[in-house]
Each structure stands twice: as C-alpha cells, then as structure tokens.
Amino acid sequence: MIKRAPSGHLLSAVYRKPTHSDRYLNFRSEHTIQHKQSVVNTLLDRAKKLSSTTRDLNSELKYVKRTLLLNGYPKWMIKDEKKKQYNRPLEFRSKVVLPYSANLGETLKRILERHRIQTIFKLIIKLNTVQASGKDAAPASKRRGVVDEIPCGNCEHRYIGETKRSLSTRLKEHHRDTSPRNILKNPEKTALTNMQPKVAMLSIGITPMFYITQIVIINAYF
C-alpha cells in the first residue's frame, strides 16, 4: 500500500484485502519443516521490506507473529528466523528423492546430511488428489497436445502424428488432404500417403481408418 506523508513523501506499508482470512500453511500439516520455515521468513521479510516507518514495521511484525501463532507455529521458529536465514548451505555430493513422512523425514534427512547427501521430499497426498476438479473431462476428440495413431485399412502400416491442436481438428485436415482430388493435386501435403502409394489410394478410396484412431500420449508438449 502506498500513502503520502504530511511532508509529501511517499510511504509504503503492507496491505491486506478485507476478505483476507489469515490462513497460511498450518504447522501441523504434513509438510517439511523447510516449507513451514519459508512461510515465516516470507512474512517477516515482507514486513521489513514494505514498511517505510518504524511504527508500521512494529505493527506488521506484531500482526504477523500473532497470525503465525494462530496457525500453530511455535515461538521458537519465529524467534530463530534470523539465525536460520543466514546458515551457510552444505555442499552435497549426491541427492535422493523420498516420500515425506512427518515422523521419519526430518530424522532421515539429518542422517543423510552427515554423509553429504541432499534429501528432497515428495508429498504423497496432495490437495488435487483428494478434491475433485469440478469440471467434466474433455472428450478424446477435444484433447489438445496429443500423439495419435491412425491404422491403414488395407495394409499393416500405421501413421503416428502429433498436434498441439485438438484431435478433431487434425482429423478433419487429414480427411481433406486424403481426398482423391487433393491427392492428385498435391500428394506430398499429408504424411498419410506414406501408408499407401498414390495410385493405390486413388483406386480404393480413403484407406486411413480414422474411426479407430487411438491417442497414444495426452498432453504432449513439443
């Protein structure tokens, strides 16, 4: 928040919306101690960087500490913020990724650090795994970023292609490009002609079996 002092100078302070709930990552949640410490560091650093006056700074620090206590954070974590912030990072020779467990994770990390092994924790249960998205799944023909497979109706060949657009849009283009008129005009326009020679496609019609097209990969990023 920017405000003007009586002297005309611009001052800044932390602003919260009226709908702010004072909810942060709860200390009793199944997260690593580093995540919880980062919540403390971020809130205290923001108070120091955005508060132009000592009065605003003291008021914000008091508010932050009270809010953190309401979210279950112990006093020792808030007081030791400065000491923890300037610890020299260790030089690791290797790293390991493990699922996080509140009862075992921190102890195991300390043991591995003695052997200069960095521990990276991965949360087992995330919010999106227990909470529905609220949206209906898009049909396969509307999926974007897919790798599709189209079999040939007259041979054992298969066409595998990729597209950033929806599958239905790409199949319409294949239908158009494999029509006898377009094959005569420009047979190299579509890679589907590689499944059958140009003469064979003209004599037996459209050989690609579009109706049994399969999606090999979903959300492929090219």
Image: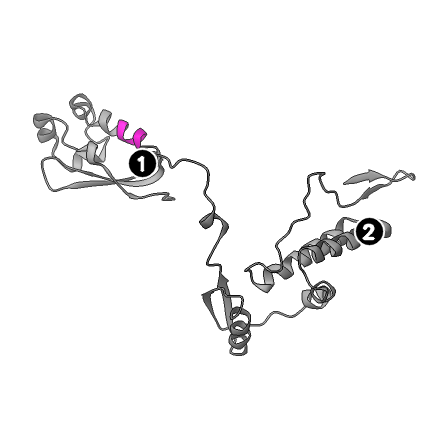
Q: Give amino acid for label 2.
A: Ser
> Total number of numbered labels?
2
Q: Position of residue 22 (x, y in %)?
A: 69, 48
Whether residue 216 is visible: yes
Q: Which residues are magenta?
A: 167-172
> Which is more toward the observer, 138 or 52?
138
Left or right for 183, reference 15: left
Left or right for 142, reference 176: right
Instruction: Determine whether the residue tagged by mark 2 lies in a helix, strand or loop.
Output: helix
Dominant secondary structure (helix, strand or loop) of the stretch shown in magenta: helix
The label on residue 140 is 1
Whether 193 is drawn above or below 129: the answer is above
> Which is more toward the observer, 5 or 103?
103
Residue placed furthest toward the right? 7
First in sequence, mark 1 or 2: give its number: 2
The label on residue 219 is none
Q: Position of residue 6 (x, y in %)?
A: 91, 38
Residue ID at (55%, 70%): 106
Instruction: Determine whether the residue tagged by mark 1 lies in a helix, strand or loop.
Output: helix
Q: Are marks 1 and 2 in contact (CB under 8 Å)?
A: no
Left or right for 206, reference 83: left
Q: Position of residue 52 (x, y in %)?
A: 82, 48
Which color scheme is applied? Answer: one colour
Q: Give amino acid for label 1.
A: Ala
Magenta run includes residue 171 = yes
Residue located beneath label 2 in the image:
59
3D distance between C-alphas at marks 1 and 2: 55 Å
Say which quarter of the image contains residue 86. Answer: bottom right
Residue ID at (46%, 49%): 130
Say which quarter of the image contains residue 207. Answer: top left
Q: Position of residue 64 (x, y in %)?
A: 74, 53
* Crowding near the residue tagged with mark 2, few <14, some 14–19, many ≥20 C-alpha atoms within 10 Å: few
